Image (spheres, rainbow, N blue to C red):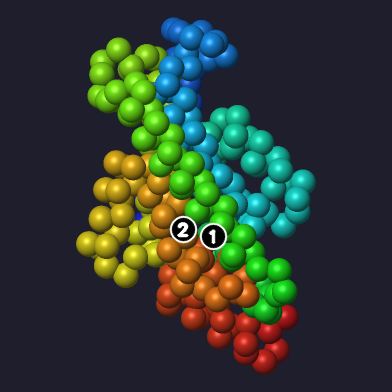
Amino acid sequence: MGSSSITFAKVLFILLGCLMLWTLVDTIRTDGLPFRKEILTPWMTATLVDFYINVAAIAVWIAYKELSWISAIFWIILLVCFGSITTCTYIVMQLFKLSSSQAIEDPFYNILLRSPSRISIERKKFSSVVALRILFGVLGCLMLGTLIYTLLTDGSPFREELLTPWMVETLVDFYVNVVAISAWVVYKEPTGIGALFWIVLLICFGSITTCSYIVMQLFHLSSQDPYCLVLLNTRDRDTLEMFIASPGTP
C-alpha cells in the first residue's frame, strides 16, 4: 500500500463522509427529526442494535488510539451521535497524520496503533483480551437473538414498506461503517479469498460477523497479551514484538 493507495483511501472516506452527511441533512429536511416513536418499527430497532454494535467495535479502537481519556470520550460521543460521519472524519485525520515514509512503509500499522515507542508488550494480571472476548461474544449473541426474534415476530425485512427515509439513512450509516471494518479485514486476512469471504458475511450479517471475527482474532492471542495486538496482521504483530524486545526501545 503506497502513496497512491493512501490518496485513494483519503478520497474514499472523504466521499463516504460527505455522502453520509448529505443523507443525514436530506432526511432531516424531508422527514423531520428521528426522535419519534413511530419510527421505531421492529426492524428499525434491530438495525439500530446492529449499527451500534459495529460502533462499539470502532469505539474500542478509538479509545485505544487516543492518548487521553478526554479526547477518547469526545470522539466516542461524536461516534454515537453522528455515526459513520465521525468514523470517516477520524480515519481521514489519521491518514493525513502519516508521514511520507510511514505511508510507503506500512500505513495500516501506523494508522491502527499508537506510536510504537508508547507501546508496552508486558504481561498483565488483568486480561483485556479475555474481557474483550466476553464483551464481543455477548454483543454477537445479543445481535443474533435480536435478529431471530425480529424475524419470528415481524417477518422478513425484505418489504418495501420498511424502507422509510430514516431506515434508508440508518442503512447508509451502517454500511459506511462496514466499509471501514472491511478495510481492516482486508489488511488482516492473508488471502484475497479469505477477505472476500468475510466481507460478504459482513454485508449479509452485519455486526454478528464483526463480533465473530473479533472474537476469533482475540483467540489467536494469549490471555495476557495486550489487546492492541488484535489490530495487526501476523507480520506486523511479529514486527511490533521484535521492536519492543529489542535493546534500547523506550
The secondary structure type at the circle numbered 2 is helix
Say above or below: 235 vs 218: below
Which of the two discs, 2 and 1, sits closer to the camera?
Answer: 1
Q: Measured from the top left, where is residue 220 in percent x and y?
A: 46, 72
Left or right side of 242 for 51 = left
At a point 42% along the width and 50% down the height, the residue shown is 210
> Which label was assigned to residue 133?
1
Left or right side of 69 for 60 = left
> Which label was assigned to residue 24?
none
- Say if residue 209 shows up in the picture: yes
Give 176 or 102, whichever is nearer the viewer.
176
Say above or below: 101 vs 135: below
Mark toward the start of the polypeptide (2 vs 1): 1
Quarter of the image where the C terminus is located: bottom right
Mark 2 = which residue?
214
What amino acid type should be assigned to the residue bearing mark 2? Ile
Q: Measured from the top left, where is residue 83 in percent x and y?
A: 53, 34
Residue extending farthest left: 193
Give 137 or 181, whichever is nearer the viewer.
137
Say above or below: 154 vs 234: above
Q: Measured from the top left, where is residue 176 in percent x and y?
A: 41, 38
At a point 55% along the width and 76% down the height, the residue shown is 222
Left or right side of 225 for 141 = left
